Every structure is written in C-alpha cells, then in structure tokens.
Image: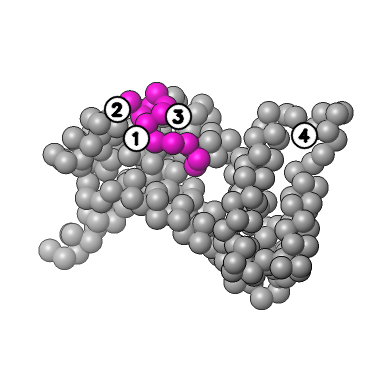
C-alpha cells in the first residue's frame, strides 16, 4: 500500500511540474493572456481536468509560476552572497544583473514579479479561484508562498547591500538600488538605452550604481 501511495505522490509531482513548465512557456510566448488552464493542460499532455486538481484556477497557477521565479532569483543571490571568492561589490553587481537578467530574458515574467495583485485582466477571476480553493482546491496559499519567496530574495539582497554600506544604511540604499535596477530593466525593454542620445548599456549603469553606493559605504 505504501508503494502505491508513493507512486501516486510521485505521479502527482510530475504532473504538477509539467503544468508549471507549460504555463511558464506560454507566459514567455504570449504573456498572461496566453495562459489558460486548457492550453496549459494541452501543452503539458495531461487530461483536461488535471490542472484543476493541482491549481484552483488561472490566478493560482500564475502565482505559482511567479513564486518559482522569485525562488530562482533568490537562489542566485544566495549563491552570490555566500561565495567567499567574491568581493562585496562583485556580489552586489551580480545580484543586480541577476534581477535585470530576468527582464531581459523573460519580460512577461519580470512584469508579473512586480505587479500589484488585482490590477490585471487575468486576475479578475481571483474571487472565483478563492471559492474553488475553499471547496476543492489543494492545500496551501499560493499568494503567501509568493510573498515568502519574494521576501527571501529581498533578505538575501539586503544582506549583500549591508556588507557594502553597513546595517544603518541598508534599507535606504537597498531601495535605491532596486529602483535603479527596475528602471534599467524597463529602459532596456523599451529600447531607450541603445539610442544615440543616451548611449548607455545595462552593464555600464549597473557598474555606476554599485560604484556610487560603494563610495557612500566607505564614507559612512
């Protein structure tokens, strides 16, 4: 009996993984509007009802994709923070580039990382998702998982900033750096960085940000 239960659990895990991968692919290809449970199920090669056994609805599925996005970035920043071969400036530079890199490679996911819940068309079914979750959905709160994953990234990032500017200035300069990184990502996505007027690159701007904050850290 135990062997059967383990096999079912493993099968469920494989199906969930396939659904998440399919949703992430559709998101990359066409944005949130391209992600529907029917399309996700078809792309994953599962039965029509399978997505509903793992996710309460489209919003919870997209939230899980975003959560995994934050987890990947958090893992990258953690690896940078704990690398003894890197200087504090190199760690910060790598963390900023990791975040901006998502904007370069997966712009739809990047936009969803920072969106406010309840403000996009694909979230209009959020209330229905909640009812489904209460009646027949899987255990756990996808929104809470997303908050924890984003919070973990922030904690790892702020620890890197603290090593450069000190604990007292960490949150102020952490907010400044994240705002700068977000602006750089948006400018690059819109094509403004490569214009003749600005003649700036992402790497140049990241280097400038890190150097400016590093100089502040030396004087405070």
Q: Which residue is mark 1?
A: 59
Q: Residues within 10 Å of mark 3 (few under 14, many from 20)?
A: many
Please tell me which of labels 4 and 3 falls first in the chain. Answer: 3
Q: Residues within 10 Å of mark 1 (few under 14, many from 20)?
A: many
Label 4 and label 3: CA atoms lie apart by 26 Å
Give 20 or 15, whichever is nearer the viewer: 20
Q: Which residue is mark 3?
A: 32
Residue 142, visible in the rendered structure? yes
Q: Quadrant of the N terminus?
A: bottom left
Which residue is tagged 2?
A: 125
Q: Residue at x 34, y 45 (%)?
A: 143
Is any part of residue 41 visible from this angle? no
Q: Position of residue 3 (x, y in %)?
A: 19, 64
Q: CA distance from mark 3 to mark 1?
A: 10 Å
Q: Quadrant of the C terminus?
A: bottom right
Which residue range is magenta in the image?
A: 112-125
CA separation in Å, label 4 and label 1: 33 Å
- CA gap between label 2 and label 3 equals 13 Å
The residue at the point 47 percent across, 36 percent down is 115
């Amino acid at each position: 009996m135990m062997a059967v239960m383990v096999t079912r659990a493993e099968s469920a895990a494989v199906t969930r993984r396939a659904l998440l991968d399919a949703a992430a692919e559709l998101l990359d290809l066409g944005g949130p509007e391209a992600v529907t449970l029917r399309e996700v199920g078809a792309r994953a090669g599962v039965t029509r009802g399978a997505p509903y056994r793992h996710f309460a609805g489209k919003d919870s599925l997209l939230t899980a994709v975003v959560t995994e996005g934050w987890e990947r970035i958090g893992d990258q920043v953690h690896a940078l923070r704990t690398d003894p071969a890197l200087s504090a400036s190199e760690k910060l530079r790598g963390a900023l580039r990791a975040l901006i890199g998502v904007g370069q490679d997966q712009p739809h996911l990047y936009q969803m990382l920072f969106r406010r819940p309840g403000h996009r068309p694909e979230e209009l079914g959020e209330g229905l998702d909640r009812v489904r979750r209460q009646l027949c959905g899987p255990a756990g709160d996808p929104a809470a998982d997303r908050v924890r994953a984003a919070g973990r990234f922030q904690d790892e990032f702020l620890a890197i900033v603290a090593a450069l500017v000190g604990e007292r200035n960490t949150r102020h300069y952490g907010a400044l750096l994240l705002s700068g990184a977000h602006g750089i990502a948006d400018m690059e996505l819109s094509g403004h960085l490569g214009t003749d007027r600005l003649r700036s690159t992402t790497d140049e701007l990241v280097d400038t940000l890190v150097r400016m904050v590093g100089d502040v850290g030396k004087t405070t």
